[in-house]
Amino acid sequence: SDNGGTFDLLILGAGSGGYAAAIRASELGMKVGLIEKDKLGGTCLHVGCIPTKALLHSAEVADAARDSDTFGVKAAFEGVDMAGVNAYKDKVVSRMFRGLTGLIKAHGITVIEGEGKLTGPDEVTVDGTAYKGTNILLATGSKPKTLGLEIDGEKIITSEHALRLDRVPKSVVVLGGGVIGVEFASVWRSYGAEVTIVEALPHLVPIEEESSSKQLERAFRKRGIKYELGTPFESVKTTDSGVSVTLKGGKTLEAETMLVAIGRAPVSEGLGYEEQGIRLERGFVKVDENLHTGVGNIYAVGDLIPTLQLAHVGFAEGIYVAEQLAGLNPPAIDYDGVPRITYCEPEVASVGLTSTAAKERGYEIVEQDYNLGGNGKSQILQTQGSVKVIAQKDGPVLGVHMVGSRVGELTAEAQLIYNWEALPAEVAQLIHPHPTQSEALGEAHLALAGKPLHVH
Ligand code: FAD
């Protein structure tokens, strides 16, 4: 094969993990090759974080129009025009895409277009041309799991189809009550659809604190979103009008569309990984704490490895690998300290340990709930929810768990509290601006420090 050149770092996949590594490595003086078969930016920019949050923002606008009377504003909700929603969403994505493309270029990163395959411990081949890397980073990301169901893109769809529907479905069954499932359920309900979520585990967003899941369930019920919890999916049939979904136990649900949102599988097959001796576990590339695969100078990051499947985790891992290669000796990533946000209405957000995890690790804990009912800004927004803080008895904060409109933004403070191992009394000492939702965080810590203000 032809020789495409040699790079200090050759990266396979230009999603969050791959492109962050590329930028950081080039900043540190490395010659970087970035191989991408589709578009710079990957899942997050094109079919993940950004377009879904645009759909959610349109949902928020729809809710505001529908509920405008609550705020004394005369407006009529006449429905959602998907052509308009998609045009707005696409405008956001293309602007971000242009920005990213410019950024990659400005860093002098060589972008190699095409599908790459690992053909040696220091080699990736793209369309017959072999590129050499002193170091190689695998960042091929993930794709929707489908349970072997036939995805026709109309009646049975994944998140990728759900992002470009040309009309609002009348009714939807959402298979999976994790982040992606509940976000789409929330969007479609705001757009006017009948929505039922099917989740095999006992709660929606099951990795979150149980009290957060329960609050989300209550809020969804009020919004008219139905759910079947603790009920595994059994089978689905397409019918003339849509789908007929059968659950374990025999119950059936009819809908126009079924969204399959049962998780994402790593893209690791047929790419030469195993042939080069890289070990896979359930399809994920196995890495050590340095994100090294154990083969040559090959590293892996992002959704491809079994860490949290989040864009900001991909960014952090990409930067971590680049800095290691440059000899900077970066501190290990603390995965417990990564903020987790589910952007539905209301939002669910957390940092640190759940109470169950804290107990499992042997901590004696204290907990404090602060209901947003006592928070002025939340009343202005007419949102319900709470902030819960878990701390080690006589020790630092171990976890923060929040539910409510826009509480995702509060992870900015919660992560400082957690990552800096703040004591509740120290946080109680901070003056929070009034009236903001951040005061709820302050109030929970005031109460934990033994000096509750707006709590009884
Ligand atoms: P990816 O972004 O998947 O990128 C992998 C890249 O590799 C792709 O561009 C692909 O084309 C390329 N590639 C694959 N194989 C090859 C090959 N052989 N040759 C060349 N190129 C190849 N995360 C958040 O933090 N916040 C959110 O709000 C959020 N919302 C989401 C909503 C949805 C609907 C989805 C699906 C995901 C969401 N995520 C969110 C998750 C986030 O998108 C991922 O964690 C992130 O994109 C992972 O980055 P990555 O670089 O590992 O992989």
Image (cartoon, grey):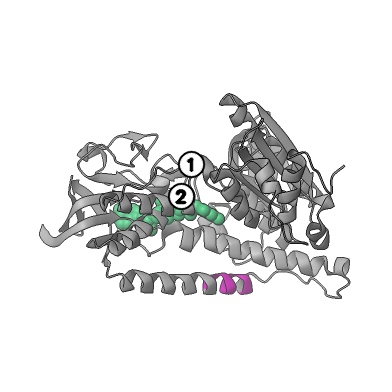
Q: Is residue 86 magenta?
A: yes
Q: Which residues are magenta?
A: 84-90
Question: Label 2 amino acid?
Answer: Val
Indicate the quadrant where residue 131 lies.
bottom left
The quarter of the picture where the N terminus appears is bottom left
Residue at left 40%, top 34%?
A: 282
Quarter containing ligand 1?
A: bottom left
Amino acid carrying mark 1 in the image: Tyr
Closer to the camera, 222 or 406? 406
Residue sitting at 79 percent across and 42 percent down?
A: 451
Q: Quadrant of the C terminus?
A: top right
Q: Does residue 397 show up magenta in the picture?
A: no
Q: What residue is disc 2 on?
A: 313
Give the camera-side residue of 300 and 201: 300
Provide residue 394's location: percent of width, then percent of height.
66, 31
Q: Which residue is mark 1?
A: 335
Q: Can residue 288 be seen in this snapshot?
A: yes
Percent position (x, y) of residue 187? Answer: 67, 58
Left or right for 293, reference 61? left
Q: Is mark 2 within 8 Å of ligand 1?
A: yes
Residue 222's disc is none
Q: Residues within 10 Å of mark 1 (few under 14, many from 20)?
A: few
* Mark 2 or mark 1: whose residue is earlier in sequence: 2
Residue ID at (30%, 51%):
328
Residue 149 at what x, y percent from top left? Answer: 50, 43
Callout 2 secondary element: helix
Question: Is residue 114 or residue 18 the one in the foreground?
Answer: 18
